[in-house]
Amino acid sequence: MPPVNLIGLLPSELEALARDLGTPAYRGRQLATWLYRKGVLDREAMTDLPKEFRERLTEVATLALPAVERVIASQDGSRKLILRLHDGGRIHAVLMPDEDRQTLCLSTQVGCGFACAFCHTGTMGLERNLTADEIVAQLLIANAELPEGLRVTHLVFMGMGEPLANYASTVKAIRIFTDTRHGFGYSPRRITVSTVGLVTGIEKLAREDLGVNLAISLHATTDAIRERLMPVNRSWKLEALLAAVRKFPLPTRRRVFFEYVMLDQVNSSLEDAHRLARLLRGVRAKVNLIPFNDWEGSEFRRPPLSTILAFQSVLLNAGITTTVRWSKGEDIGAACGQLSEVAEVRAAAGGSR
């Protein structure tokens, strides 16, 4: 069997590995602390681990990260990390600074198979799922990119791919991120999982008791328009999707996020705004209106600012918390819906290292 990658193993799995190698379980916990809390990947630097244990680890396990192929910097301070995987596939992770926050947008698949009409990533198709270690590695790499003393504060599963279509790896990565004793120790409040609306995945996630935030890529207020924009709506209509959302367990004072890309002459009318308010009645919701981020070959356009603000006003008047989210990294092809191989090539002209 090929060596197991230590990155992406739960602390409990590292304990089991330690026992299998003839050492006490607590050595596995120490190893987890070095990897996840301290971000140390050099076995020789793990000075509280016995030399014999470190040598045995070298024989049966590896510490492998994707290669950082390129880092592209945006004028707004965002950075797109282009990572090459062991099989040659490429994924993107995006670091987005905002005052005292450092948010990392994580990918869960190489490409995406859901073909949302407004999303450039969807034009790639799906190549494969990421493994848990490839998801966790994005955080380790991002933290290493930050200046000393800073680390990623918030995690959003909004990069390449559909997290709930790569369910097992996504949940395993979240458990490593939120392990408070020997994992990264992130509060679930600081982690958001976004989905195109896989109802069975939402229902399954609700039973995991992870406590993370849920974001729904909604983007339309009728089944007809949503099916045009998002083929997934043929499997789960709006009624079924919102029924699953209403059953999703929300901690006190938490809301479900609804992402709504604003497309001129498609989903941005005042009638759409009033329909959206009715759809979300009784849901503890926050709506993020996302002005469309252009990409070459797209049939869509961003509505005028006056249209966006009028849409927002309808929702605010209905008592729904609503923000206009101007995406970071648009100039480097790192904004919402822009992550793709073509966007990477186009953005490279803007400056990279």
Image (spheres, rainbow, N blue to C red):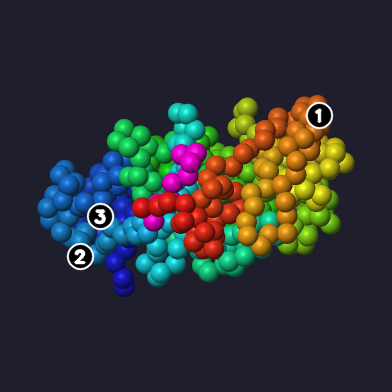
> Number of callouts in the render?
3
Disc 1 vs disc 2: which is toward the camera? 1
Q: Residue at x 40, y 64 (%)?
A: 85
Q: Marks 2 and 3, how far apart in space? A: 15 Å
Q: Nearer the viewer, residue 188 or 223?
A: 223
- Percent of width and height locating residue 275: 85, 41
Q: Residue at x 59, y 42 (%)?
A: 327
The residue pinned by badge 3 equals: 19
Q: Secondary structure at mark 1?
A: loop
Start and end of the magenta stretch? 70-77
The amino acid pointed to by label 3 is Arg
Q: Residue at x 84, y 57 (%)?
A: 224
- Percent of width and height locating residue 314: 81, 32
The residue pinned by badge 2 equals: 59
Label 3 environment density (alpha carbons within 10 Å; few <14, some 14–19, many ≥20): some
Q: Secondary structure at mark 3?
A: helix
Q: On the rendered structure, is 17 left or right of 239?
A: left
Q: Marks 1 and 2, how far apart in space? A: 62 Å
Q: On the rendered structure, is 285 left or right of 11?
A: right
The residue pinned by badge 1 equals: 318
Residue 132 forms part of the magenta stretch: no
